Image: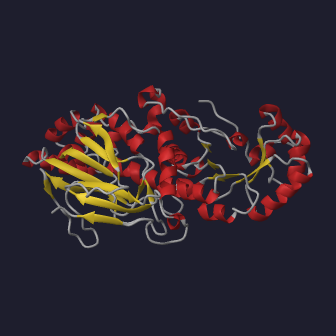
Amino acid sequence: MSGVSMGATCGAVIPTIVPRPLSAIPACDRTLVNVTAALLTDQYELTMVGAALRDGTADRQCVFEVFARRLPTGRRYGVVAGTGRLIELLREFRFDRADLDHLREEGVADENLVNWLSRYRFRGDITGYAEGELFFPGSPILTVSGTFAECVVLETLILSVFNHDCAVAASAARMVTAARGRPLIEMGSRRTHESAAVAAARSAYLAGFASTSNLEAGRRYGIPTTGTAAHAFTLLHDDERTAFASQVAQLGKETTLLVDTYDIAEGIRTAIAVAGPELRAVRIDSGDLSVLAAHSRQLLDSLGATETKIIVSGDLDEYAIASLAAEPVDIYGAGTAVVVGSGAPTAGLVYKLVEVDGRPVVKRSEHKATVGGRKTAVRRHKPTGTATEEIVVSRGLPEAQTGDRLLQREFVTGGEPVDDIPTLTQSRERLHDALISIPWEGLKLSAGDPAIPVTIVPAA
């Protein structure tokens, strides 16, 4: 999919996207995808596998669950994100010869473990909440079942993907709510690790952002891309007029001109003088955005540029965006805050063993106790569609009631992904609907209880 200009995000119809499979990405470009995912593993996972192989427990059938004990401070919901990335990474989760040689040379794995790792394939099952679904404390958002060895070795990969992607998606969703229907651009690539930048762009798009500045995210996931010029381009030229004229000559009047390099009012006058009132947008990246947006709108209107949009950026988070709700801002650009989870860089998810050979197992550590057994979750709703609570039952099914919606679905069966995994576009729609379904208090940016309560019913 080709990129679109920054101004084109306003009112644009977001296309259906088709992610590129990992196998379609040239080998020279795959470093960002972490193809050697097998070594993205904490050493203790392999230590446990080695010991379990030796004592004969490695093949016991087990169930692991991913959940959050609590939400990050100030949050009222979490957003499931990362499932699609995890499934793609599982396809490549193999220990190649270089990996095995390294583990052997470093004394991490003996020959018995090396032989087992050389044949590793995940052949178990994965179920869970769909991407774009909301979650709350105790929600079993992912369930991984299979032998102990094949499941435990995935712990770090699963938690790395979900803790990052869910954190970004939750912060992005809060920004989308604060923007009240105005488009947002994800532009945080320069504020995080290069691989995290691509994943963050995906999560932000899932949460409702209109586009990203990251070209690799555009290529890999089909997300609309956008971008025009930085202050450096203006400074390169002898004056602002020359810089603007060059940009318009290259990109046309549908471009966005950055007007705050020197004096904003003069920058706007110059932009309209160069491009005319048909200029698509101006961008302001510094200063008191509330005051500047209002003054800029008045100035643009006085110059006849009544349709020229105003884009604001510059360390925006959900609170800053909410504070601009009454101002004439058309598009927001968010960078640092979104890619670092806006103060909550991890979703706080854990990966815990809950069942061994059909027998529930529990952890009783203070403040870290678990509920044993495989869980089944439903969300209950009023006839109006408003969610009221989530019921999680261990080793059974919740008693059916009108308005119940089953939350878990299959993703991997016998080691193979199922055919009907939701697309990123479908996940965006799911999250949009989910946010509408929770009580309005749950959308507040202030601290408070989770949007809906979760009741966990232990095994009988």
Counting the numbered discs, the total is: 0
The colour scheme used here is: secondary structure
Q: Is residue 318 left or right of residue 77?
A: right
Q: Is residue 343 left or right of residue 163?
A: right
Vertical placement of 359 versus 457: above or below? Answer: above
Front residue (pair 126, 239): 126
Task: Say which quadrant the C terminus sits in.
Answer: bottom left
Q: Is residue 190 left or right of residue 11?
A: left
Q: Position of residue 127 (x, y in %)?
A: 30, 45
Front residue (pair 411, 451): 451
Residue 381 can be seen, yes or no = yes
Q: What residue is shown at x 70% (from left), y 62% (from top)?
A: 324
Q: Position of residue 328 (x, y in %)?
A: 76, 57
Q: What residue is shown at x 45% (from left), y 61% (from top)?
A: 77
Residue 266 can be seen, yes or no = no
Q: What residue is shown at x 14% (from left), y 52% (from top)?
A: 356
Q: Position of residue 2 (x, y in %)?
A: 62, 30
Q: What residue is shown at x 47% (from left), y 53% (from top)?
A: 434
Vertical placement of 242 versus 347: above or below? Answer: above
Q: Position of residue 64 (x, y in %)?
A: 24, 52
Front residue (pair 414, 38): 414
Task: Say which quadrant the N terminus sits in.
Answer: top right
